[in-house]
Structures are given as C-alpha cells and as structure tokens.
Image (cartoon, rainbow, N blue to C red):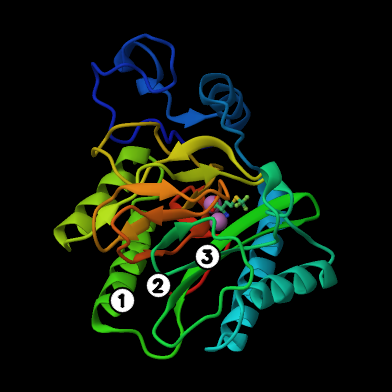
Amino acid sequence: MFQNPLKAKTGRNDPCPCGSAKKFKKCCMNKDAYDPSALKDLYYKQYKIRLKNQKDIQKLRKAGQLVINTLDLVEKNLCAGMKTEEINTLVHEYTIAHKAIPAPLNYRGFPKSVCVSVNEVICHGIPGEQVLNDGDIVNVDVTSILDGYYADASKTFFIGKGGREAISLVDIARECLKRGIKKAQPGKTLGDIGWAIQSYAEQSGCSVVREFVGHGIGFDFHEAPQVPHYGQKGEGIKLVPGMVFTIEPMINLGKKDLRILPDKWTAVTKDNSLSAQFEQTIIITEDGCESLTPYEL
Ligand code: MF3
Ligand code: CO
Ligand code: CO
C-alpha cells in the first residue's frame, strides 16, 4: 500500500479519477492508501492500461538496457557513405546475438528490423539503399523484445557536422523529450506531458507532429494509452505508479503536416523541412519516473 496517487491535484468537486462517476469528495478523496491490485483492475477496466509490477520492471530494465546498447553500437559505426541497410544489419544481428527479437520486423508488414529516418523523414523510414551523407540527421529507432518484454527508444544522430538549423532542431527535439519526462510523475496527467512538449517546441519556432504519438508498452509493442506530444495542462488520464509508456516527440523545423510515401510506411514532412525525434520508455514510480531506456538528454 502506498500514498493514494489519485489524491494529488484533484479538486473536491471534480469527478473522481477512479471513474466511479461520483464526486471526488464522495469517493476516493478520503482514502489515504490504495490497493495496487485495485488500481490495476481499475486502470485496465477504464482505460485498458496494463500496469506493471516489480517483476515486470526488472525484465523491462533488461530489455531497455539492450536497446540502449544497440543504439550505442549504431552510433559508433555511423559514418558518411554508409547505407541505411547496414544499420539494419547491425541492429538485427546484435539483437539476435543477445537472444532478443527485433520488434519492427514483420510488425504489421514492416519489412526491416529497425526504423531509420533521415532528414525530412519524420519516422518509420525503411532501411535500404539510401546512402548517408555529411550533414544528414538520422533517427534510429530500436525496439527489442527480450524474454517477452518490449522496450523502445530512439535518438537522432548527425553524420559529420550538422548545419546550424539541424543542430538547433535536434537540440529542441532533445529538450522536448526532457521536458516531457519531467512531467511524468504520479498525480500529473498525460495532458501535462503533451503541454510541456508542445509549448516548448512552438515557442522555439518548431512544430509538433500529431499523427504519431507515444504509447503504452511492455507486454506488447503498442498498448494503451496513447501519449500525445501536444495537449492541455491537467487534461487526460492521471498518471499512476506502474504505468509504462514511451514519450517520443517528433519535431519539425517547418510545419507539422506530413505525407506518407507509396511504401505505406515512410512519413515525411509535407514541406520537406527537417524533422528530429528522441524516444525513451519510462515507468511512473511512487515519486516520479524511471527511464527503462536511460540515456543523457
Ligand atoms: N518504434 C516505433 C515507435 O516508436 C514504431 C515502429 S513500428 C514499425 O513506436 F513497424 F515501423 F517498426
Ligand atoms: Co515508440
Ligand atoms: Co520507437
């Protein structure tokens, strides 16, 4: 039993966040403690969110560490002249060698083991014959399944030295993830995370992609809830311990609009402006959050 996480920031006369349809003061306001198994049932019933327990967290940390090690390996090997297919080979072989499965491969028909998204590609770039050039920015998005558990993270790298605008965009995208993670605490809401990201991106002169969002993860690749990178303070589902989800803002230098290429996967900015993204998988804890795919932001 822990401090009641529903208690933070709910007004007496607000609808009870437990979903009972009663006022908060007539319902959970006077419960000092909560029963984790009751919360688990509640979040599943109400939102289809599957809260994770201590055993799950230990497995997720291992899956997450593998994802981070994979990104480190990619970073060490990135260079101008390389084909994006070579990144796929590195990720695929490293994942398999560590008794894990690359989650993208054959996921809804995705043909490769990793997403590689260069310059104006927002996400879901398919590795292939494209050659990386000096000055490119490239997002590498790795999701691995280890012992049945999924972890998902991505980083945007520079090939050689980036131009002034690219450096600024990548800094803004990284800071967006950092600010989103800062709001990931019990008592805050999904809207608080979205608001922190959107307001920083827009005040920096960039835009936030709407069509793709963060997601619950752990037992499956994409679980409830959806985690928008835009929104209003205080709106949306209240965060509670045991929630595991990704935050993965896609930030464009130009307008937010996108189009999908005929391969049905590759999302590119409509105005061909640069796009950058950073992603981590996090878990809400009793006093904040822990990154399960930790790297410095
Ligand atoms: N890793 C992506 C995400 O962050 C999803 C890729 S789906 C794939 O959610 F099929 F393209 F791999
Ligand atoms: Co993701
Ligand atoms: Co991802």
**Where's the C terminus, which quadrant?**
bottom left
Looking at the picture, does residue 235 appear above or below residue 164? above
In-front residue for pair 83/30: 83
Q: Amino acid at mark 2?
A: Leu
The residue at the point 39 percent across, 23 percent down is 17
Label 3 sits on residue = 154
Quadrant of residue 250 in the image? bottom left
Residue 95, given in percent of the width and then of the height, sits at: 76, 68
- In the displayed structure image, the side of residue 139 where residue 29 appears, left or right: left
Quadrant of residue 253 in the image? bottom left
Q: Would the CB of label 1 be found within 8 Å of ligand 3? A: no
Q: Earlier in the sequence, mark 1 or mark 2?
A: 1
In-front residue for pair 119/23: 119
- In the displayed structure image, the side of residue 139 where residue 150 appears, left or right: right
**Number of numbered callouts drawn:** 3
Residue 174, given in percent of the width and then of the height, sits at: 36, 68
Query: Which mark, by number, is residue 166?
Result: 1
The residue at the point 26 percent across, 18 percent down is 14
In-front residue for pair 255/288: 255
The residue at the point 51 percent across, 54 percent down is 266
Q: Would the CB of label 3 be found within 8 Å of ligand 3? A: yes
CA distance for labels 3 and 2: 12 Å
Labels 1 & 2 near each other (Cβ < 8 A): no
* Element assignment for label 2: loop
